[in-house]
Image: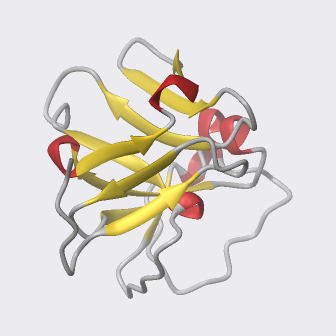
Amino acid sequence: MLTPSPQTFRGSCLCGAVHYQIRSRPKALSHCHCRQCRKSHGAAFASYGSVLRENLQVVRGVEAIKSYQSSEAVSRQFCLHCGSSLFWSRQQGEFADWISVALGTLDTTFTTEKQKHVEVTSKAPWFDIKDQWPQQP
């Protein structure tokens, strides 16, 4: 079990079956507009922050997590009971040691100034980006 520290963040799914904690502040906060993220979240975009895999621990409900291979390189995890999107990660390559956490599932509050929109060429045509964060194709 991870020992809570000042940098421990907690999260859970909508129904509370899955609880997790991360031992570091999420990095690379992004709002992804790709079709898969939009479908997975049922929204205009999905907001994620990344942490090293070794800093993530599911503390309750590991049996309630279902994995879905959304592409050859990407696996997404969600709650079997309520459908909450929880994590996504790459199985190989440069970022295989990292896992992205759906920021909406965090129960611990945090703020950050550094965020970005990614995959904006795939964004929903009905959504206009009107904030100050950078946009990457």
Could you tell me if residue 27 is visible in this image? yes
Q: Indicate the position of residue 49 as horizontal and vertical percent values.
A: 38, 59
Q: Nearer the viewer, residue 35 or 70?
A: 70
Q: Indicate the position of residue 71 as horizontal and vertical percent values.
A: 47, 16
Residue 8's quadrant in the figure?
bottom left
User: Which colour scheme appears in the figure?
Assistant: secondary structure
Residue 129's quadrant in the figure?
bottom right
At x 86%, y 58%, the residue is 126
| Side (left or right) of 63 relative to 44 | left
Q: Indicate the position of residue 15 as horizontal and vertical percent values.
A: 72, 48
At x 22%, y 62%, the residue is 23
Residue lying at the far right in this picture: please name it. Answer: 126
At x 19%, y 31%, the residue is 96
- Count numbered badges in the picture: 0
The vertical placement of 66 against 121, above or below, is above
At x 71%, y 52%, the residue is 14
Q: Nearer the viewer, residue 94 or 104?
A: 104
Q: Nearer the viewer, residue 123 or 3?
A: 3
Q: Nearer the viewer, residue 132 or 100?
A: 100
The vertical placement of 92 against 137, above or below, is above
Q: Indicate the position of residue 114 as horizontal and vertical percent values.
A: 35, 80
Could you tell me if residue 31 is visible in this image? no
Residue lying at the far top in this picture: please name it. Answer: 72
